[in-house]
Each structure stands twice: as C-alpha cells, then as structure tokens.
Amino acid sequence: MSTLSGLASKDNFASDREAAEKIMKVLPGVRQVARENRAFLGRAVRFLAERGIHQFIDIGTGLPTRENVHQVALGATRDARVVYVDNDPIVLVHARALLADNPRTSVINGDLRDPKSIIEHPETQAQIDFGRPFAVILCAIVHFVDDDTEAASIVAHLRDTLPAGGALVLSHGFKGELNDETLAEAEGIYARTKGALKVRDRSTIRDYFSGLELVEPGLVHAGSWRPDHDLEEDQSAPGVLGGVGLVPGRAGR
C-alpha cells in the first residue's frame, strides 16, 4: 500500500501514518496531492466507463476507500468487471471481505514487479475478457520501483497486453522544480520506513505512455486532469502527474 493511498483514506496503517507524518514535514502539500490523486483515479475510471471500457485491472489498489474503481465503474455500467491487485496480506483480507458479495470483482495477490503473473493469474483470466478493451490502472505505484529500466519494462509489459481501444491510467510522483536536497530527504525518509521511492521527471513519466494516444489534457498534475471545477495549477511544481493513454483503435462493448 502506498503512503499516498494511506493519506487519502481514513483506513491506513501505523507505518503509513509514520512515513506520511515525516514526509509532510518536508513536503507540506503531500496530503492534498494524495487527495488529488484519488480524485483523478475516479474521474479517469468514470471517463473510460462512459466511453465503453468496462473492464479494469487496478494494480496496487491499497485498502478500499470511498469511490473505489468498481463503485465508479458500476455507476456508469452494470457490466463493469474489476480485478484488484495487491501484495499486502492485510489489504487482501480487508478487500476480499468487503467485496465478497460482488461476483464481478476479484481481489488477487500480485506484485507489480511480476506483471506477467498478474495477467496470467487464473482469477484475472476468468474476470477479464482479453479480446475486448480493458484498462490497466497504475495509480501512484510505479514510483515505488526505484530502478528506471525495471519500471519502464514493467509498464511496457502491461501496456503491451492492452488490445485496440484499451487504456492505461497512470499517475506518478513528479519532482518538478524540487531541489535535490529536499528530494533526497523525502526519498530517504520513505526508504527508512517503507521502502524505495523514486519520483521522476515529466519526460520519463511521459515515456510510460509510448505508443498510446494521450487523452486531453495530456499528462498534467492529477488535480488538473478533467477537474470537476475550474482549477489553475503550476504544472512545473512537484506533485503527482496523471494521464490516460488509449491504444489506437475502436473501443467496443
């Protein structure tokens, strides 16, 4: 589970709160960034569901909160199918208990670093029709892979599974104009409490959408992606960038 997810939810772990409190002293706006990231996820799923994409694989879902992927998607279509993926045993138990009565939603134990096993998991194969468009969701998760080559390879593998009309929803920590000293301090705090954290530049994050058609307004701060109200943000400021990329081709039901 990511610290961003923990900050956006009332249900979080002591370790998440500990890391978050320390990081907030260095980056005071991180709580708002977490909320914007969560809201971006909801808007992106709603956009895709209304467009005709009714299948979603949400990797690194974290603890369920309000307006989860299946809830947003079901608001647009009764046919929505969702596979939630996480590798935290507490998250898995909690999520399965909440979703036990929903046959169109599965929760599987999977690790982002092994994308092949996520796609080939029996429950993923049973829930998702790979012959029709589906979306892979990587919200605030890839920045926990600190090796740039490995991160790019993981995203490329998942991107390559998408059929024509499919979509990639991705948000990622953005260093913006953050000075190296502050950035190193924040990454160090996370490394000592939770594990690796690697925020990246805009160009690197943009490359994750290689071969896809970015939906307007493109790769922007999460809060600026099709917001529900007028919003002006400094796009060079540090935070989380979000975007939705579509595989060229017609989405079908």
Image (cartoon, rainbow, N blue to C red):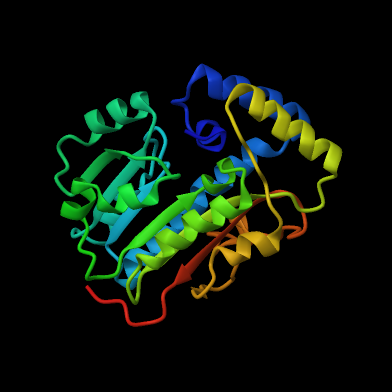
User: Residue 228 appears at what percent x and percent y?
Assistant: 53, 59
Q: Determine the residue positioned at 62% across, 52% down.
A: 148
Q: Given the current orientation, which residue lies at the most extreme bottom position? A: 249
Horizontal arrangement in the rendering, residue 47 relative to residue 118 (left or right) = right
User: Residue 201 appears at what percent x and percent y?
Assistant: 71, 56
Residue 147 higher or lower than 253, as above or below: above
Residue sitting nearer the eye, 200 or 177: 200
Q: Is residue 72 visible?
A: no
Q: Determine the residue positioned at 14% across, 45% down.
A: 103
* Total numbered labels: 0
Q: Is residue 74 visible?
A: yes
Residue 203 higher or lower than 238, as above or below: below
Horizontal arrangement in the rendering, residue 56 relative to residue 200 (left or right) = left
Residue 58 higher or lower than 15, as above or below: below
User: Residue 242 appears at what percent x and percent y?
Assistant: 57, 58
Residue sitting nearer the eye, 70 or 246: 246
Q: Quadrant of the C terminus?
A: bottom left
Residue sitting nearer the eye, 167 or 200: 200
Q: Determine the residue positioned at 48% across, 69% down.
A: 245
User: Residue 91 appears at what percent x and percent y?
Assistant: 36, 29
Residue sitting nearer the eye, 16 or 124: 124
Q: Given the current orientation, which residue lies at the most extreme top position? A: 14
Quadrant assignment, res 28 = top right
Quadrant assignment, res 85 = top left
Horizontal arrangement in the rendering, residue 28 relative to residue 216 (left or right) = right
Q: Determine the residue positioned at 57% across, 48% down.
A: 36
Horizontal arrangement in the rendering, residue 198 relative to residue 57 (left or right) = right
